[in-house]
Amino acid sequence: MIWQHVSTIAVGAVLTATSIITGLTFTMAMRFWEKRVDITTAPQTAGYLERKTLVDGLGTHLIWTVLVGVASTAWSAFGALVSGPNLAVWATAVCATLLSYQLLMVAEALLKLYTSSIELGQ
């Protein structure tokens, strides 16, 4: 984006998208936090080491995704507040990088959820 001198006028739309995605992943992370507590403390799930490892890994991944989303949302909000009609080229590059990384993390979490349901279902 920097090499092509791309700047965006749609920082408000990017802010909306990152806020929605961050809210979704925050909800998923809280749900996995509940599962993490349940699988650690409940006596009927004490023998499920594979499931515990999976829930711990996904919970950590989702928390990291939320942190990236918060950074992306904060950067987009900052850009929306201080920019004129166009966001600067370097600020657009940072915004695009954070949003792309967040979307990659969400896609990876969904892929992990899907493959784990197949692996644990066998």
Image (cartoon, rainbow, N blue to C red):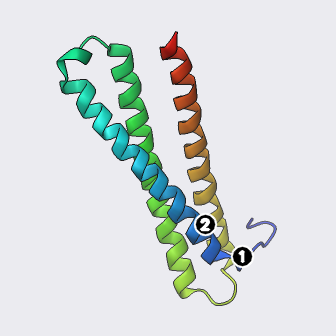
Q: Image quadrant of residue 31?
A: top left
Reading the image, the residue beneath label 1 is 8
70 left or right of 37?
A: right
Tag 2's secondary structure?
A: helix
Amino acid type for the residue under numbered disc 2? Cys
Residue 72: % across, % down: 52, 63
What whole-number distance in Å separates the C-alpha atoms at marks 2 and 1? 10 Å
Amino acid type for the residue under numbered disc 1? Thr
Residue under the image location 50 percent in, 14 percent down:
121
Residue under the image location 31 percent in, 39 percent down:
33
Tag 1's secondary structure?
A: loop
Q: Image quadrant of residue 56?
A: top left
- Badge 1: how crowded within 10 Å, few (<14), some, or many (20+)? some
Residue under the image location 55 percent in, 72 percent down:
76
- Find out whether the residues at labels 2 and 1 contact each other: C-beta distance under 8 Å: yes
101 left or right of 62?
A: right
- Badge 2: how crowded within 10 Å, few (<14), some, or many (20+)? many
- Which one is in front, 110 or 82? 110
Circle number at residue 92? none
Reading the image, the residue beneath label 2 is 95
- Which one is in front, 24 or 107? 24
Residue 92: % across, % down: 66, 71
